[in-house]
Image (cartoon, rainbow, N blue to C red):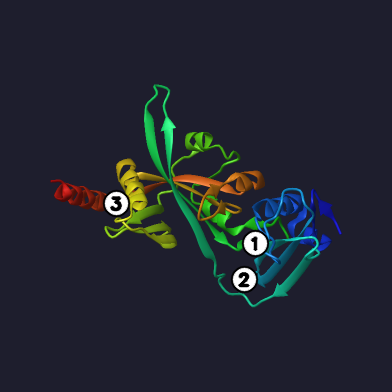
Amino acid sequence: MPTTRNVAWDGRLQAFKGRDTTLYVTTAADLAKTCASCRVPLEPGEPVSLLVDITQSAAPDGTEYLTFTDSVCHRRCSGPALTVRQTPWQPETLSPVAARVILTQKSDGGQARVVPALAFTFVPVLSFREDGGELTSALVALLLARGFQLAMSHDYAAILEQAAEAAANCRITIAPGGLLRLRLDGEILYREQLHPANADDAEWLQAAANSGNILVISGDNLNITETGLDIRPAARHGTLVIGTVQVSGVGTFASTSRLREQRRTP
């Protein structure tokens, strides 16, 4: 039973993760907040076990796809475990998790630029391996092929300096009613219904209208909850991807919003 830091894990995991095994183990432990068995909060440094479920399938072109689903338990609740299941090939159903934030970038002259950002990922993590090569994140590979970049730092100031415009076939549209769509090659990668009547949504939409661009932060191992966004695990794991994407359609909302504000003014 290998143990990394305070995390016990099944040694067979190394056959799937290779040299990334240790980082995968520690990242999973860092992301876990409660025991998957007893639901009691996990304390830093206490003995825990990693449980991993792997689903294997082969695409028609021979590419092997693996879906990793992991959980962390108190060692007293469960020992480490690894299960591997073979399934027929089918397009993987993934669930999006996202957060929207507004960042501020200051110039050398002290002027502030407001940058709307969309952070999103999919769970579980989907990886693939071609011809016995290295295991590769499907989401990260998809975005890198569309002009996104790997970000090795979780520092937002550094990310804002580094982020370049994504490929022309990557676009975000926002309908007047607040429906956001992120398209790659014409296909919808992510969609979210925003509500202009909500103050937080309206502020973010207005920032997008003023900027004309949205900073997209994505990849694997983003820790997104109802109360916060933590991109440090993704940066440590080398799966943090960034890019600036042009937005269209939001100008219609901005005009409508200002009109409503004027009508409410006594």
Name the residue that disc number 1 marks.
128
Image position of 204 (left or right of 155) = left
Give the answer, above or below, for where 128 lies relative to 234: below
Q: Residue at x 21, y 52 (%)?
A: 256
Give the answer, above or below, for where 264 lies relative to 109: below
Can residue 225 be spotted in the picture? Answer: yes
Name the residue that disc number 2 marks.
59
Q: Residue at x 15, y 46 (%)?
A: 265
Tell me the mark number nearer the camera, choosing from 3 and 2. Answer: 3
**Nearest to N terminus: mark 3 or mark 2:** 2
Q: Residue at x 54, y 50 (%)?
A: 144
Give the amino acid at mark 2: Ala
Name the residue that disc number 3 marks.
250
Q: In the rendered image, which quarter contains the N terminus?
A: bottom right
Locate residue 56, reporting x and y percent: 68, 70
**Number of marks drawn:** 3
Locate residue 61, reporting x and y percent: 61, 69
Query: How far is the residue under mark 1 from the one under mark 3?
Result: 36 Å
Callout 3–callout 2 Cβ contact below 8 Å: no
